[in-house]
Image (cartoon, grey):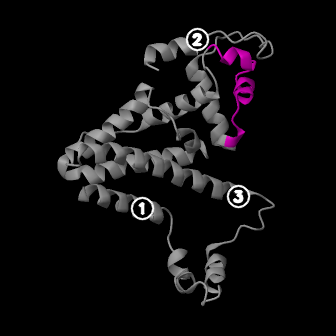
Amino acid sequence: MDPKERRAARHQPPKPGASPKPRRRTVPITVEQVVDAALGIIAAEGYEALSMRRVADALNTGPASLYAHVVNKTDLDELLIARLSAKIVVPKPEAAKWRAQIREVCVQLRDLYLAYPGISGAAFAVAPTDLDTARLTEGMLAILRNGGVPAQAAAWGVDSLLLYVAAYCLETSIVRRRVAEKDAVWVVGRDEMRRRLASLPAEEFPYTASHAAQLTAGEGHDRFDFTLEVMLDGLARR
């Protein structure tokens, strides 16, 4: 869907009987307000708490009134990812610095996703129809191509990098949420996990048991940095 079709679809009237009559507002709703309200809900409660009804409540209106601006929840997801993409500062490509530049973009995206717990789940299967999302892809592709990465490898590389960042952030958000749950007694710390792995029957799990320390190692975003470097190494060899 091109930008013109997208805007037209976003302003289609709601289907009759699809939602209850909205409450009256003295100030018209805008797409920007819808996105702002959605991000506020996610920042406070996580992406799982987001729904069209929750957004409508935050804007003191009814869900039906939102459909004059947002086609559906999937459309809202795309708008959310586009808003975050617009915040990314993509450096001007420099051949000698392509690895550092790609790393910088990925770290920015990681930190934005983590500021809105679970939102990276909305990034999966999102087509870059929004200009802000497309600009991020364009910028990353430009960096890789200027760095000498072949066209096909660069194209798939951008997709792979974005998928990894989204998956890493989604898992991190899930872990943080589970740790915060009051009844999450089954969540164990690193020391306990290391002990459990090391105590596995050595005859059945010789490598797992003997590598328990390595399997549970890492501070902060060490694993993220490691995987990112592995991916960049692969692109460099192309």
- Relative to the observer, which residue lies in front, 219 or 206? 206
Asked whether the residues under the numbered discs 3 and 2 touch, taking CB atoms below 8 Å apart as contact, a structural biologist would say no
Looking at the rendered image, the disc whose residue lies closer to the viewer, 3 or 2, is 2
Reading the chain from its start, which is encountered first: label 1 or label 3? 3
Query: Which residue is tagged 2?
Result: 11
- Taking the image as shown, residue 210 lies to the left or right of residue 42, namely left
Residue 106: % across, % down: 40, 49
The amino acid type of the residue labelled 2 equals: His
Q: How far apart in space, not on screen, are marks 1 and 2 (Cα)?
A: 42 Å
Q: Is residue 181 above or below residue 34?
A: below
Query: Which residue is tagged 3?
Result: 178
Reading the chain from its start, which is encountered first: label 1 or label 2? 2
- Taking the image as shown, residue 31 lies to the left or right of residue 20, namely left
The amino acid type of the residue labelled 3 equals: Arg
The secondary structure that dominates the magenta segment is: helix
Query: Which residue is depicted at the point 56% across and 46% down?
Result: 115
- Relative to the observer, which residue lies in front, 200 or 190? 200
Q: Quadrant of residue 63?
A: top right
Q: How far apart in space, not on screen, are marks 1 and 3 (Cα)?
A: 24 Å
Query: Which residue is depicted at the point 59% across and 16% down?
Result: 30
Reading the chain from its start, which is encountered first: label 3 or label 2? 2
Instruction: Name the secondary structure under disc 3.
Output: helix
Q: Residue 227 — which label? A: 1
What residue span does the magenta drawing correspond to?
48-68
Asked whether the residues under the numbered discs 1 and 3 touch, taking CB atoms below 8 Å apart as contact, a structural biologist would say no
Graded by Cα atoms within 10 Å as few (under 14), some (14 to 19) or many (20 or more), the crowding at tag 2 reads some
Looking at the rendered image, the disc whose residue lies closer to the viewer, 1 or 3, is 1
